[in-house]
Image (spheres, helix red, strand yellow):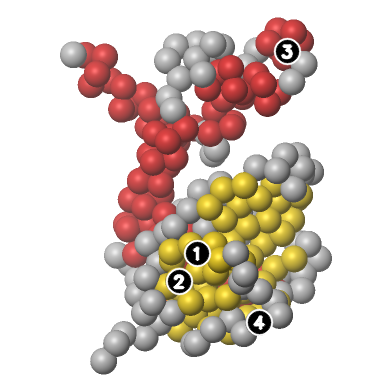
Amino acid sequence: MASAEEAPSVADSIVTEFSTYEAYLDSQITPTDLYYLEDEELARQLVELGYRGSGEVIKREEFETRKIAAAASKLSRRDQTKDLTHTGKDLKGCVFLEALAQREEANRCGKMTTILFIRDRNSKGQEISGYIDYAHRLKTEDFEPFFLGRKKLLPRRTDLSFYNWDTNICTSNSTPNYEIIADSTIGLIFKNKRDRKVINVDPKASPGDNTTRTQVVTSKYIHVILYDHITRRKA
């Protein structure tokens, strides 16, 4: 019984120590593993499957769930003070951070749900792109490192959509705000769960009712587009 009671605290400490699941897997890889395998990604897979590393490896789903819960808990404490994350931050003249700051309050209170399209390179130099539910990320992640310029906001596998152009890894997930619809003729579209309006991300088409498309030109990213959807309750 003791081990069962200790397991959550061990997992929580791991989530606190490592910013990503990949970083956690890397901590279990030894120089000897890399010498013989000659492939970092393969070494990670072996650790995740339990063939390498020390002790029992927590699963990716558990890591992500605990990460989100920890961030949500921290943010709920901050929300009690009614402070916005960007308040008092030096945004260093970054037009993208300024755009996020301008939309933070509306996304937190539910007046607006912004979808961010970001295309850039990850820490490995691989080109990635994806659509991010900004309002959802604000509720599940601490944005202070982003507004302080210490961390770069990039799409992840858990976002609305994610694509790695080098590895061809592609994922999509619905969020509390949006449902994903893959249309064979239109392509990828998002349906707002609150007012049922559809956001069309095709640059050649109208973005939809109560939605505006804004391109942010910045040297810090390859491509950034914001889709601002004003949510309106049905009468």
Number of numbered tags placed on the structure image:
4
Q: Nearer the viewer, mark 3 or mark 1?
A: 1
Crowding at label 2, few (<14), some or many (≥20) Cα neighbours within 10 Å? some
Drawn side of residue 63 relative to residue 234, left or right: right
Dot 2 corresponds to which residue? 191
Q: Look at the numbered disc 3 and give the secondary structure of its residue.
A: helix
How far separated are the C-alphas under marks 3 and 1? 40 Å
Between discs 3 and 4, the one toward the N terminus: 3
Q: Quadrant of the C terminus?
A: bottom left
How far separated are the C-alphas under marks 3 and 2? 44 Å
Residue 37: give its label: 3
Q: Residue furthest front?
A: 185
Q: Nearer the viewer, mark 1 or mark 2?
A: 1
Dot 4 corresponds to which residue? 205
Q: Position of residue 22 (x, y in %)?
A: 59, 32
Q: Look at the numbered disc 1 and give the secondary structure of its residue.
A: strand
How far separated are the C-alphas under marks 4 and 1? 16 Å
Q: Position of residue 190 (x, y in %)?
A: 50, 69
Between discs 2 and 4, the one toward the N terminus: 2
Does residue 208 appear anywhere in the picture? Answer: yes
Q: Position of residue 232 (x, y in %)?
A: 37, 86
Tell me the amino acid under the disc marked 4.
Ala
Q: Are marks 1 and 2 in contact (CB under 8 Å)?
A: yes
Residue shown at the point (59%, 22%) measured from the top left: 45
Between discs 1 and 2, the one toward the N terminus: 1
Residue shown at the point (74%, 8%) measured from the top left: 36
Dot 1 corresponds to which residue? 181
Q: Position of residue 18 (x, y in %)?
A: 52, 33
Between discs 4 and 1, the one toward the N terminus: 1
